[in-house]
Image (cartoon, rainbow, N blue to C red):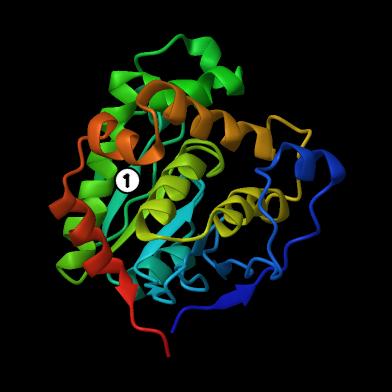
Amino acid sequence: MLSTTLIPLGVATAAQAQAAPAVITAHAAPAPLAISVPGVQNARTFANYTTISGMRISDKVIRSANLASLTPAGVGVPERHQLRSIIDLRTQLESTVQPDKAVPGATRHSFDVLGAVPVSYLVDLPSAYRAFVTDPHAREAFRASLLDIKNTVGAGGSVLFHCSAGKDRTGWLAAVLLTVLGVDRHVVDADFLASNTFRHASPNDPLNGVNIGLLNTAFAAADKTYGSFENYVHQGLRLSDSDIAGLKKALLLPSI
């Protein structure tokens, strides 16, 4: 059994509420389901979420920060979770400076998101979030990640994806995955902002935290470049209807 803890999310600040899409919901977003992985920050699954149609999300996908400080005790957690694939979204330099610890039974894949953009984008976050959508190298990394999730979970294994802090590149991949699966935008937003809770950070702290304006920047780039998020998925990420159906088949479970 995994050690899990529900992490409650705080109420959005006035600035966050102003930046968020004008969607009114009568229900608060569910708390993310944390996983205790000694040595790894920001580790959680999507198992506490449901789609708009009421389907539950599988616990077979984990998002986290990097695995450089994974302890021997921590290695046992993904092993018990039948982890078969580790997706590293970092640049080659980042992964060289802080290499992931190996997890027996899991294959590591380097899907570098920002390796082809100016290095300044690692600190210029609005530009980075636009590049997540507009840069061909970044799109290929996210496409490869989503296909790996589909194939690995479809074969019965689990996937862990991460970047450095597990909040920006990881946050966009999580947002894309949840949106493709049919999760409501207010839940997608809350999952993104949960990094502030897990990292004990302020939304105004660009190094440790996130703010909803960053996520909005990426979604806006998708709309501006492709006309809609759906077009971004089909044209930008080149995911076919069959690919999307495969993701849903692998990750969606009937409601209880």
**What residue is rendered at 35% in x and 18% in y?**
135
Query: Label 1 crowding class (10 Å Cα cut-off): few <14, some 14-19, many 20+?
Result: many
Q: Pointer 1: what residue?
A: 87
Residue plotted at (34% across, 83% down): 254
Q: Residue at x 33, y 69 (%)?
A: 79
Compared across the picture, whether 151 is left or right of 133 comes to left
| Image: 121 above or below 166 | above
Residue 93, visible in the rendered structure: no
Question: Left of 189 or right of it: where is 81?
Answer: left
- Would you say residue 80 is visible in this rendering? yes
Residue drawn at 76 percent across, 33 percent down: 205
Find the residue positioned furthest to the bottom. Answer: 256
Q: Quadrant of the C terminus?
A: bottom left
Quadrant where the N terminus is found in the figure: bottom left
Residue situated in front as seen by the camera: 8 or 235: 235
Asked whether 190 or 223 is in front, the reply is: 223
Q: Is residue 128 above or below residue 146?
A: above
Answer above or below: position of 57 versus 241.
below
Badge 1 amino acid: Ile
Left or right for 205, reference 195: right
Tag 1 secondary structure: strand
Judged from this view, the residue extending furthest toward the right is 14
Location of residue 225 (image quadrant)? top left
Q: Where's residue 184, x and y in %?
A: 52, 59
The spot of residue 223 in percent (x, y) is 45, 30
- Residue 180 drawn at (x, y percent): 36, 53
Residue 161: x %, y % from top left: 38, 49
How many circles with numbers are drawn on the protein? Answer: 1
